[in-house]
Structure formats: C-alpha cells, structure tokens
Image (cartoon, rainbow, N blue to C red):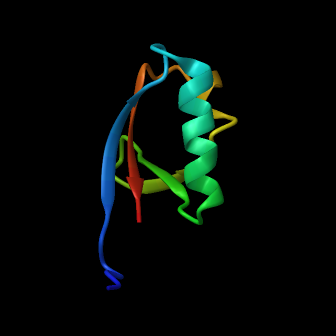
Amino acid sequence: MSTPHAAIVMDLHLQRDLPQAINFLHHIEETGYPLRSMSYEGDLVLVEANTMPNQLQKYWALWLI
C-alpha cells in the first residue's frame, strides 16, 4: 500500500551518540528520503547528514517527506 502524502517527523539529539546518529541519517538518505529541517522562518530546508554535526543546534526536528 502506498501513502504518497505521508510524512515522518522525528527529533534527533546528535550529542548522545554522534556516529550512530550520522549512520542512521545516511541510511535514511540512501533509501531516498531527503532530510529536511524547519527554519526559524517556518520553511522546510534541505539538510545533509554530513553537515549536521557542524551546526550549532543541539537537536534536530527532521521532516521526511
């Protein structure tokens, strides 16, 4: 069964286990889901697993659409 309008929203805390979190995010990207985060303006912006550890955010609310 296909659900083309489904979305997954998840909270991710990188400081708990960074290598495991990054591997998990790479797996999500490999399955075809682009990673999106909500900006302070309320827009969904694309992010990449490799760049997330360099950001100042302590946690991420990611949208998989």
Residue 24 screen position, x and y as percent: 55, 39
The residue sitting at the top extreme is 16
Side of 1 relative to 47 (left or right): left
Task: Name the residue: 59% across, 62% down.
Answer: 31
Task: Name the residue: 31% across, 50% down.
Answer: 9
Side of 52 relative to 62 (left or right): right
Say which quarter of the image contains residue 11.
Answer: top left
The residue sitting at the front extreme is 1
Residue 63 screen position, x and y as percent: 38, 53
Which of these two is toward me, 26 or 37? Answer: 26
- Asked if one can make out residue 31 in the rendered structure from this viewpoint, the answer is yes
Say which quarter of the image contains residue 39.
Answer: top left
Which of these two is toward me, 57 or 27? Answer: 27
Task: Name the residue: 42% across, 56% down.
Answer: 44
Locate the C terminus and report the quarter of the image it occupies: bottom left
Residue 26 vs 23, above or below: the answer is below
Residue 29 screen position, x and y as percent: 61, 55
Locate the N terminus and report the quarter of the image it occupies: bottom left
Residue 65 vs 62, above or below: the answer is below
